Image (spheres, rainbow, N blue to C red):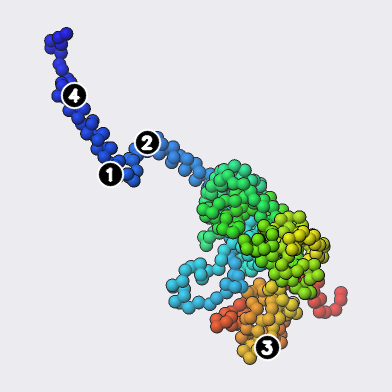
Amino acid sequence: MEREAGRPRFWTRETRLLLITVGLSLAVLLVLARFRFPDQEPLELPTQPLQRLAARAAFDDLSAAVARAGERVRPALRVVALPAPGDARSFTVEEVLWSRPEEIAAPLALAYRFNERAAVMLTQSRVAPAIAPATGLSVLASDDVRGFAVLAVEDGAAGEWQSLSVSSPLSPQYLLLAEATRAGVAVRPLFGGAADPFVDPQWNQPILALGRDVHAPDGAFVFSLEGAFVGAVINRHGVQAIVPAEALVRAAERLMTEGRRATGSIGVRLQPLDATLMAATGVQGGALVTEVAPDGPAASLLSPGDVIVAVAGRPVDSPETAFLAIARHTPGTPLPLDVRRSRERLPVTVTPVAVRRPDAGEASPALGAVLRPVPSGSRVQSVSAGGAASRAGLREGDVITWVPGVVEPDPREVSATWDQLAGGQSMLVGIRRGDEPLVLAPQKAQSTAGSSKPPTGGSQ
């Protein structure tokens, strides 16, 4: 059939052949490129404008939620500088200029006010913290096993406070992380993924794992984006986890009511089980007894080579697990142990005794430290926990080289100078710690009303 006259012909035979040739050439080039560059990622099309606007809107919503939650939780938080005794140092100009800032400045911690007059702070160690008096906080009691302290909020530092509800992250969601910085409380979003809780021997109850790749400092506090208290961050063997808020507040309230509980001990040394020891003892988990104190509670009950597999009915898998369970038990009350001896089960009941911190020396009637005269002054033999010397940072082994008006004082001169102070006053004390000279300022406690002297003069 002949083409109609006058109708233009747009696709000539040559045009069609040209387009087919171009298409085949591009296809061949793409195939050759995949063979030539096999590792090259395929070209991705740019994000569409609407998608970019949606992502920006989600970010803005999250930023606004974090800001609102931060305003709500900040009145309940307080940054605390910890002039820890072990960190007391003096510096040269070279050390200040060429050291990292964290090597010079006192460490920081964050305290959460769970009621109007008390706050809780994770100490990141099992030693009671020292807090500068200017913070308006003071240590009421500390829990050596769990590693936290309850602080009293003084009248002048109470400020505005608002009670926060308690929440638990039961599903993956964004949370608010609050941490201590030199500029104050910093908040940022933290994604809490789905993770099964695990029982932690330190807390003796389930805690929530955050994972190894989550950057959250120990002692930071976590809140929901609605401002509810979720918990506190701890590090358990390299894994970041959250102690639930309800458990932390309950433990803090109990510590306030009962005071510092005595720590139990049965007088043994324990060793982890490796594969060789497991095969030799026939036990797949537990803590191996390596030494028994001859005058300790377990002297006639346990022997080297025994394996403790359970404490109070709870399985143990390491010396830490066993010792934490023993330390939590009330001293002076029977404690059942499940022991394996020569591959046979041996039930044992032992009565732990109370032990003190290594830094809790015999109380001194003056400074709160036991001193011994040495040629250069007075050497500190031990420091009473919670005393003025301990609060100021005095440590065992320090040598007091001067007090006001006396160089190289003996213990009696140190005590006499201290006794002259009125309640609430501080005294500069020069010490030498190793080869380093330091100056500390212990503060004398305020006298109680009952111990104050009556005024002189006749009666009316």
Residue 372: image location, x then y, percent: 69, 86
- At mark 1, the secondary structure is helix
Q: At 60% from the left edge and 51% from the top edge, which residue is drawn?
A: 209
- Tag 4 residue: 16
**Measured along the vertical axis of the image, is residue 263 above or below residue 186?**
below
**Res 373 label:** 3
| Residue 439 falls in image quadrant | bottom right
Instruction: Decide which of tag 3 and tag 4 comes sooner along the chain.
Output: 4
The residue lying toward the viewer, choosing from 47 and 41, is 41
Q: Amino acid at mark 1?
A: Arg
- Tag 2 residue: 48
**C-alpha separation, residue under disc 3 versus residue under disc 2:** 80 Å
Disc 3 crowd rating (10 Å Cα; few below 14, some 14-19, many 20+) is some
- At mark 2, the secondary structure is loop
Q: Amino acid at mark 4?
A: Arg
| Residue 110 falls in image quadrant | bottom right
Instruction: Decide which of tag 2 and tag 4 comes sooner along the chain.
Output: 4
**Res 390 label:** none
The residue lying toward the viewer, choosing from 105 and 447, is 105
Instruction: Decide which of tag 3 and tag 2 comes sooner along the chain.
Output: 2
Instruction: Decide which of tag 1 and tag 2 comes sooner along the chain.
Output: 1
Q: Amino acid at mark 3?
A: Pro
The residue lying toward the viewer, choosing from 263 and 33, is 33
Q: At 79% from the left edge and 74% from the top edge, which residue is drawn?
A: 295
Residue 77 visible in rendering: no
**C-alpha separation, residue under disc 2 versus residue under disc 4:** 34 Å
- Tag 1 residue: 36
Residue 221: image location, x then y, percent: 60, 54
- At mark 4, the secondary structure is helix
Q: Residue furthest left?
A: 5
Frontmost of labels 4 and 1 is: 1
- At mark 3, the secondary structure is strand
